[in-house]
Image: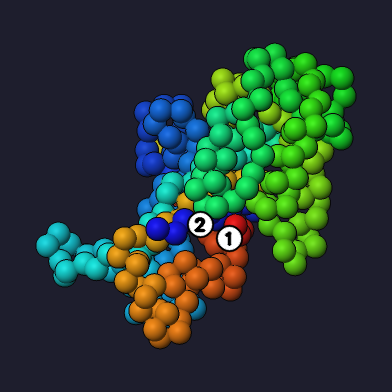
Amino acid sequence: MCIKIISMFAETAVHAGTGSDIGAVELPHQRERATGIPTIHGSGIKGALRDAARRCLSNSLVVSLFGSAPPQAPGGAQLDPGGLAFSDARLLLFPCRTIGPIFAWVTSPYLLARVQRDALSAGLQCPDVEFFKPSDSEAYVTTTSDFGAQVFIEEFSFTKRADSRVDKWAQFISGHVLPGDGLPSYEFWRNHVVKSLVVVSDSNLRDFVTYGTEVVTRVRLDPRKKTVVEGALWTEEYLPQDTLMYCVVVEALRAGQQVAEAREAEQKPPLGQLSTVIESMPVIQFGGKESIGRGFIRLRFL
Protein backbone atom coordinates (compact mmCIF):
# COMPACT_ATOMS: atom_id res chain seq x y z
CA MET A 1 0.00 0.00 0.00
CA CYS A 2 1.45 3.34 -1.09
CA ILE A 3 0.84 6.47 1.00
CA LYS A 4 1.49 10.08 0.02
CA ILE A 5 0.86 13.46 1.62
CA ILE A 6 -0.53 16.55 -0.10
CA SER A 7 0.09 19.90 1.59
CA MET A 8 -2.74 22.45 1.35
CA PHE A 9 -1.93 26.16 1.68
CA ALA A 10 -4.94 28.49 1.79
CA GLU A 11 -4.30 31.41 -0.56
CA THR A 12 -7.76 32.79 0.28
CA ALA A 13 -10.13 32.21 3.18
CA VAL A 14 -11.90 28.84 3.03
CA HIS A 15 -15.51 27.93 3.83
CA ALA A 16 -16.09 24.19 3.93
CA GLY A 17 -19.51 24.37 5.52
CA THR A 18 -21.57 21.95 7.54
CA GLY A 19 -24.92 23.54 6.73
CA SER A 20 -26.98 25.62 9.12
CA ASP A 21 -26.38 25.49 12.88
CA ILE A 22 -28.18 26.63 16.01
CA GLY A 23 -25.06 28.31 17.43
CA ALA A 24 -23.93 31.91 17.15
CA VAL A 25 -22.71 31.29 13.58
CA GLU A 26 -25.43 30.18 11.16
CA LEU A 27 -22.99 28.66 8.63
CA PRO A 28 -19.99 27.24 10.53
CA HIS A 29 -16.87 25.62 9.09
CA GLN A 30 -16.33 21.86 9.33
CA ARG A 31 -14.60 20.71 12.51
CA GLU A 32 -13.34 17.48 14.00
CA ARG A 33 -15.91 16.11 16.43
CA ALA A 34 -13.59 15.28 19.34
CA THR A 35 -11.07 18.13 19.17
CA GLY A 36 -13.00 20.97 17.54
CA ILE A 37 -10.08 21.58 15.17
CA PRO A 38 -11.10 22.89 11.71
CA THR A 39 -10.92 20.39 8.87
CA ILE A 40 -12.12 19.74 5.32
CA HIS A 41 -13.87 16.43 4.90
CA GLY A 42 -12.23 13.88 2.63
CA SER A 43 -15.31 13.76 0.42
CA GLY A 44 -14.89 17.46 -0.35
CA ILE A 45 -11.19 17.01 -1.13
CA LYS A 46 -11.93 14.07 -3.41
CA GLY A 47 -14.68 15.98 -5.21
CA ALA A 48 -12.51 19.05 -5.85
CA LEU A 49 -9.62 16.94 -7.15
CA ARG A 50 -12.00 14.91 -9.29
CA ASP A 51 -13.32 18.09 -10.88
CA ALA A 52 -9.76 19.23 -11.59
CA ALA A 53 -8.83 15.83 -13.04
CA ARG A 54 -11.68 16.07 -15.56
CA ARG A 55 -9.85 18.96 -17.19
CA CYS A 56 -6.58 17.15 -17.86
CA LEU A 57 -7.33 13.38 -17.85
CA SER A 58 -9.59 11.15 -19.90
CA ASN A 59 -12.91 10.09 -18.41
CA SER A 60 -11.72 6.49 -18.04
CA LEU A 61 -8.69 7.62 -16.03
CA VAL A 62 -10.87 9.85 -13.84
CA VAL A 63 -13.13 6.89 -13.05
CA SER A 64 -10.14 4.64 -12.32
CA LEU A 65 -8.74 7.20 -9.86
CA PHE A 66 -11.89 8.51 -8.18
CA GLY A 67 -14.52 5.90 -8.98
CA SER A 68 -17.86 6.33 -10.68
CA ALA A 69 -19.80 9.54 -10.23
CA PRO A 70 -22.49 9.32 -7.52
CA PRO A 71 -25.88 8.17 -8.83
CA GLN A 72 -28.57 10.76 -9.38
CA ALA A 73 -31.03 8.76 -7.26
CA PRO A 74 -31.03 5.69 -4.97
CA GLY A 75 -30.78 2.43 -6.87
CA GLY A 76 -28.90 3.97 -9.77
CA ALA A 77 -26.27 2.40 -11.99
CA GLN A 78 -23.59 0.06 -10.66
CA LEU A 79 -20.74 2.04 -9.11
CA ASP A 80 -17.03 1.31 -9.64
CA PRO A 81 -14.70 2.13 -6.72
CA GLY A 82 -11.71 4.38 -7.34
CA GLY A 83 -8.06 3.57 -6.85
CA LEU A 84 -7.40 6.39 -4.36
CA ALA A 85 -8.61 7.04 -0.81
CA PHE A 86 -8.45 10.51 0.78
CA SER A 87 -8.28 11.48 4.44
CA ASP A 88 -9.84 14.60 5.92
CA ALA A 89 -7.60 17.67 5.83
CA ARG A 90 -5.50 17.98 8.98
CA LEU A 91 -4.42 21.32 10.40
CA LEU A 92 -0.69 22.01 10.77
CA LEU A 93 -0.26 25.80 11.11
CA PHE A 94 -2.93 28.34 12.07
CA PRO A 95 -2.31 32.08 11.47
CA CYS A 96 -2.97 34.39 14.43
CA ARG A 97 -2.58 38.08 15.19
CA THR A 98 0.60 38.99 17.03
CA ILE A 99 3.05 41.77 17.88
CA GLY A 100 6.34 41.49 16.00
CA PRO A 101 5.88 39.46 12.81
CA ILE A 102 2.98 40.37 10.52
CA PHE A 103 1.28 37.25 11.89
CA ALA A 104 2.24 34.17 13.91
CA TRP A 105 1.93 30.62 12.65
CA VAL A 106 0.68 28.66 15.64
CA THR A 107 0.82 24.91 16.17
CA SER A 108 0.84 22.49 19.12
CA PRO A 109 2.38 19.15 20.17
CA TYR A 110 -0.78 17.32 19.07
CA LEU A 111 -0.69 18.78 15.56
CA LEU A 112 3.03 18.09 15.22
CA ALA A 113 2.60 14.53 16.49
CA ARG A 114 -0.04 13.89 13.82
CA VAL A 115 2.11 15.17 10.99
CA GLN A 116 5.08 13.19 12.31
CA ARG A 117 3.02 10.00 12.33
CA ASP A 118 1.65 10.61 8.85
CA ALA A 119 5.03 11.65 7.43
CA LEU A 120 6.69 8.49 8.71
CA SER A 121 3.87 6.41 7.20
CA ALA A 122 4.59 8.10 3.87
CA GLY A 123 8.32 7.43 4.16
CA LEU A 124 9.31 11.01 5.01
CA GLN A 125 11.77 11.98 7.71
CA CYS A 126 10.74 14.77 10.05
CA PRO A 127 11.94 16.15 13.41
CA ASP A 128 11.04 14.67 16.77
CA VAL A 129 8.13 16.07 18.77
CA GLU A 130 8.58 14.40 22.16
CA PHE A 131 10.30 17.36 23.82
CA PHE A 132 7.43 19.81 23.16
CA LYS A 133 5.57 20.11 26.46
CA PRO A 134 4.71 23.80 26.81
CA SER A 135 2.62 24.90 29.75
CA ASP A 136 -0.40 27.14 29.18
CA SER A 137 1.79 30.19 29.89
CA GLU A 138 4.68 29.25 27.58
CA ALA A 139 5.33 29.52 23.86
CA TYR A 140 8.21 27.76 22.11
CA VAL A 141 9.75 29.74 19.22
CA THR A 142 12.78 29.50 16.95
CA THR A 143 16.13 30.94 17.97
CA THR A 144 15.87 33.50 15.15
CA SER A 145 12.26 34.54 15.78
CA ASP A 146 11.04 38.13 15.49
CA PHE A 147 9.32 38.04 18.88
CA GLY A 148 10.42 40.16 21.83
CA ALA A 149 10.86 39.08 25.44
CA GLN A 150 7.19 38.06 25.53
CA VAL A 151 5.17 36.35 22.81
CA PHE A 152 1.83 38.05 22.21
CA ILE A 153 -0.81 36.05 20.32
CA GLU A 154 -4.29 37.50 19.95
CA GLU A 155 -5.09 38.95 23.42
CA PHE A 156 -2.71 36.68 25.33
CA SER A 157 0.88 36.97 26.53
CA PHE A 158 3.23 33.98 26.79
CA THR A 159 6.67 33.44 28.25
CA LYS A 160 9.12 33.06 25.38
CA ARG A 161 11.08 29.81 25.13
CA ALA A 162 13.56 29.97 22.24
CA ASP A 163 14.69 26.45 21.33
CA SER A 164 16.89 25.25 18.48
CA ARG A 165 14.72 22.16 18.10
CA VAL A 166 11.88 24.41 16.96
CA ASP A 167 14.25 25.52 14.20
CA LYS A 168 14.27 21.96 12.84
CA TRP A 169 10.48 21.94 12.52
CA ALA A 170 10.51 25.37 10.89
CA GLN A 171 13.11 24.20 8.36
CA PHE A 172 11.14 21.00 7.68
CA ILE A 173 7.93 22.94 7.04
CA SER A 174 9.73 25.57 4.97
CA GLY A 175 11.55 23.05 2.80
CA HIS A 176 9.09 20.19 2.50
CA VAL A 177 5.52 21.34 3.24
CA LEU A 178 5.04 24.94 2.10
CA PRO A 179 4.81 25.59 -1.64
CA GLY A 180 8.34 26.02 -2.85
CA ASP A 181 9.77 24.31 -5.89
CA GLY A 182 10.20 26.87 -8.66
CA LEU A 183 8.01 29.44 -6.89
CA PRO A 184 10.06 32.52 -5.97
CA SER A 185 6.80 34.26 -5.03
CA TYR A 186 6.62 31.96 -1.99
CA GLU A 187 10.06 32.94 -0.70
CA PHE A 188 8.42 35.28 1.83
CA TRP A 189 6.32 32.50 3.38
CA ARG A 190 9.22 30.05 3.49
CA ASN A 191 11.31 32.62 5.36
CA HIS A 192 8.38 33.77 7.48
CA VAL A 193 7.79 30.37 9.06
CA VAL A 194 11.36 30.43 10.40
CA LYS A 195 10.67 33.77 12.09
CA SER A 196 7.09 33.25 13.25
CA LEU A 197 6.55 29.58 14.16
CA VAL A 198 5.06 29.26 17.65
CA VAL A 199 4.35 26.03 19.55
CA VAL A 200 1.73 26.45 22.28
CA SER A 201 -0.09 23.95 24.48
CA ASP A 202 -2.87 21.87 22.97
CA SER A 203 -5.48 23.63 25.12
CA ASN A 204 -4.33 27.06 23.93
CA LEU A 205 -4.32 25.86 20.33
CA ARG A 206 -7.91 24.70 20.71
CA ASP A 207 -8.91 28.16 21.95
CA PHE A 208 -7.17 29.90 19.04
CA VAL A 209 -8.82 27.73 16.38
CA THR A 210 -12.20 28.11 18.11
CA TYR A 211 -12.20 31.90 18.44
CA GLY A 212 -9.62 32.91 15.81
CA THR A 213 -11.48 31.99 12.64
CA GLU A 214 -13.08 34.69 10.48
CA VAL A 215 -16.79 35.23 11.10
CA VAL A 216 -18.40 37.42 8.45
CA THR A 217 -21.90 38.88 8.53
CA ARG A 218 -23.57 38.93 5.13
CA VAL A 219 -26.83 40.34 3.81
CA ARG A 220 -28.89 40.06 0.63
CA LEU A 221 -30.13 43.33 -0.86
CA ASP A 222 -33.30 44.02 -2.75
CA PRO A 223 -31.95 44.92 -6.24
CA ARG A 224 -34.45 47.77 -6.64
CA LYS A 225 -34.66 49.25 -3.15
CA LYS A 226 -31.02 48.52 -2.15
CA THR A 227 -32.24 47.56 1.29
CA VAL A 228 -31.78 44.29 3.14
CA VAL A 229 -34.39 41.69 2.25
CA GLU A 230 -36.35 40.66 5.33
CA GLY A 231 -34.68 37.69 7.00
CA ALA A 232 -31.66 37.80 4.64
CA LEU A 233 -29.03 38.41 7.33
CA TRP A 234 -26.64 35.62 8.29
CA THR A 235 -23.09 34.86 9.48
CA GLU A 236 -20.48 32.60 7.86
CA GLU A 237 -17.29 31.14 9.33
CA TYR A 238 -14.07 31.00 7.31
CA LEU A 239 -10.73 29.35 7.83
CA PRO A 240 -8.32 32.30 7.46
CA GLN A 241 -5.99 32.64 4.51
CA ASP A 242 -2.40 31.46 5.09
CA THR A 243 -3.69 28.42 7.00
CA LEU A 244 -1.51 25.37 6.30
CA MET A 245 -3.14 21.93 6.22
CA TYR A 246 -2.42 18.58 4.61
CA CYS A 247 -4.22 15.38 3.68
CA VAL A 248 -3.14 11.77 3.32
CA VAL A 249 -3.76 9.91 0.05
CA VAL A 250 -3.64 6.12 -0.06
CA GLU A 251 -3.70 3.81 -3.05
CA ALA A 252 -6.72 1.63 -2.26
CA LEU A 253 -6.50 -2.17 -2.28
CA ARG A 254 -7.84 -2.42 -5.82
CA ALA A 255 -5.13 0.00 -6.92
CA GLY A 256 -2.62 -2.87 -6.84
CA GLN A 257 -4.18 -4.27 -10.00
CA GLN A 258 -4.27 -0.78 -11.52
CA VAL A 259 -0.55 -0.30 -10.78
CA ALA A 260 0.27 -3.60 -12.50
CA GLU A 261 -1.89 -2.68 -15.48
CA ALA A 262 -0.30 0.77 -15.65
CA ARG A 263 3.18 -0.75 -15.73
CA GLU A 264 2.17 -3.08 -18.54
CA ALA A 265 0.77 -0.15 -20.50
CA GLU A 266 3.78 2.02 -19.56
CA GLN A 267 1.50 4.52 -17.81
CA LYS A 268 1.70 6.19 -14.43
CA PRO A 269 0.07 4.40 -11.45
CA PRO A 270 -2.86 6.13 -9.65
CA LEU A 271 -0.71 8.33 -7.39
CA GLY A 272 1.42 9.28 -10.38
CA GLN A 273 -1.68 10.33 -12.30
CA LEU A 274 -2.84 12.41 -9.32
CA SER A 275 0.58 14.06 -9.17
CA THR A 276 0.15 15.01 -12.84
CA VAL A 277 -3.19 16.65 -12.03
CA ILE A 278 -1.69 18.69 -9.19
CA GLU A 279 1.31 19.74 -11.27
CA SER A 280 -0.96 21.00 -14.04
CA MET A 281 -3.44 22.65 -11.64
CA PRO A 282 -1.62 23.49 -8.38
CA VAL A 283 -4.34 25.91 -7.20
CA ILE A 284 -7.77 24.32 -6.78
CA GLN A 285 -10.96 25.69 -5.28
CA PHE A 286 -12.33 23.83 -2.23
CA GLY A 287 -15.57 24.36 -0.36
CA GLY A 288 -18.19 26.99 -1.06
CA LYS A 289 -18.34 30.69 -1.95
CA GLU A 290 -16.24 30.31 -5.11
CA SER A 291 -17.89 33.31 -6.78
CA ILE A 292 -16.60 35.63 -4.03
CA GLY A 293 -13.06 34.26 -4.13
CA ARG A 294 -13.13 31.82 -1.24
CA GLY A 295 -11.49 28.43 -1.03
CA PHE A 296 -8.47 28.73 -3.34
CA ILE A 297 -5.81 26.37 -2.02
CA ARG A 298 -2.34 25.67 -3.42
CA LEU A 299 -1.38 22.00 -3.34
CA ARG A 300 2.00 20.31 -3.17
CA PHE A 301 2.81 16.60 -3.40
CA LEU A 302 5.29 15.75 -0.66
The C terminus sits in image quarter: bottom right
Label 2: how many Cα within 10 Å (few below 14, some 14–19, many 20+):
some
Which corner quadrant of the image does residue 104 belong to? top right
Label 1: how many Cα within 10 Å (few below 14, some 14–19, many 20+):
many
**Mark nearer the viewer, 1 or 2:** 2
Q: Earlier in the sequence, mark 1 or mark 2?
A: 2
For the point 39% across and 72% down, the residue is 259
For the point 12% across and 62% down, the residue is 75
Which corner quadrant of the image does residue 31 belong to? top left
The foreground one among 253 and 63 is 253
Residue wearing tag 1: 301
For the point 79% across and 20% down, the residue is 160
Vertical placement of residue 12 versus 263, above or below: above
Snapshot colouring = rainbow
Please state if 115 lies on the left or on the right of 242 as rendered.
Answer: left
Q: Is residue 146 visible?
A: yes
Q: Amino acid at mark 1?
A: Phe
Task: Give the SS element for disc 1.
Answer: strand
Task: Give the SS element for disc 2.
Answer: strand
Rendered location of residue 267, percent (x, y): 45, 81
The foreground one among 23 and 160 is 160
Q: Is residue 218 visible?
A: no
Q: CA distance from mark 1 to mark 2?
A: 7 Å
Residue wearing tag 2: 4
Rendered location of residue 21, percent (x, y): 37, 33
Please state if 266 lies on the left or on the right of 178 as rendered.
Answer: left
The N terminus sits in image quarter: bottom left
